[in-house]
Amino acid sequence: MNAKPMLALTAALWLGIGLSGCSDNDEDAEGTNGGSEQTQNADAADAQDASTSDAEAEGAESKAEASTSAIDPAERQQVLENSLRGNFDPQLGEIRYLVGWADLNDDGQDEAVVHVVGPMVCGTGGCDTLILQAQGDTYQVLSAQPTTEPPIALGADSHDGWQDLLMQRHVAADQPSETVRLRFDGDSYVEADGKEDDATGGKTLIEPFDSLDDAHPLFEGEISGSYEMSEPPAEASSSSKDAKQEDSSIQEDSDPEAAADAVEEEAEQQQDDSSPQQ
């Protein structure tokens, strides 16, 4: 047997086995690398989940802290008054307010709905209604609605997470008031489209009132007017009429020609009375 072919065959077989072994080793290496990548991806996902959980926990903790730091209900009236004084000029004289409290945005803290009244801050169509939200240790005006009046009540619907409000508004001084609905537009309360004559409300926040004495004082001062329209007393009207009549008679007596005519008539009357009768 020729030795050279045998040696060549043996070398080929040996090379084939070596190449096959290399291929298997490469596959094993690829499998090992793939498993390592999967492990790394799983670790990254676990880290992301842990980060999300931590963020949620921090959010819940912040919310709990905010709830704890809410304005004390026993002090909120005074805090509200201090905030309102920063929005009105004390030179306007007597200013009073009525307030209703409600959690309009379901954040666990009541907002203040305030109706401001006073001779110098109201018009023929009504007065201002303010919606204020707690910001730290004060109240900020979220919305101001002019020419409104009570009753002011919660609406049945909500918009952008804030509950609607119902109140009365005068379109014209010589016409009766009508019910308007205010909805939240993302930044403030605005009047909703359409009439709300048949609107049904929930809890009444501010009842109708008859006098300034029914409201809380904001600025003390001399009342230079009145929220109610009052008729003049009957005696005063009668006295005024008599005074006008006296003024008229005085003006007549002060006319020289009229006075001369009166003297002449009186002299002729006396002459007629003194003449003898036949």
Image (cartoon, rainbow, N blue to C red):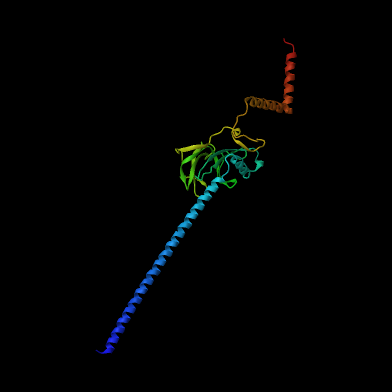
Residue lying at 73% horizontally and 19% vertically, measured from the top left: 268
Q: Is residue 7 above or below residue 219?
A: below
Q: Is residue 194 visible?
A: no
Q: In this view, does 9 lie above or below 184?
A: below
The percent position of residue 74, horizontal first and vertical second, equals 59, 39
Q: In this view, does 213 lie above or below 21?
A: above
Please state which of residues 237 and 152 is positioned toward the viewer in this rendering: 152
Please state which of residues 272 and 186 is positioned toward the viewer in this rendering: 186
Please state which of residues 50 and 101 is positioned toward the viewer in this rendering: 50
Residue lying at 48% horizontally and 53% vertically, measured from the top left: 56
Total labels: the figure holds 0
The percent position of residue 98, horizontal first and vertical second, equals 57, 37
The percent position of residue 258, horizontal first and vertical second, equals 72, 26
Quadrant occupied by the N terminus: bottom left
The percent position of residue 207, horizontal first and vertical second, equals 53, 35
Q: Is residue 247 visible?
A: yes
Quadrant occupied by the C terminus: top right
Instruction: Kindly give the residue lying farthest to the left in the view shown.
Output: 1
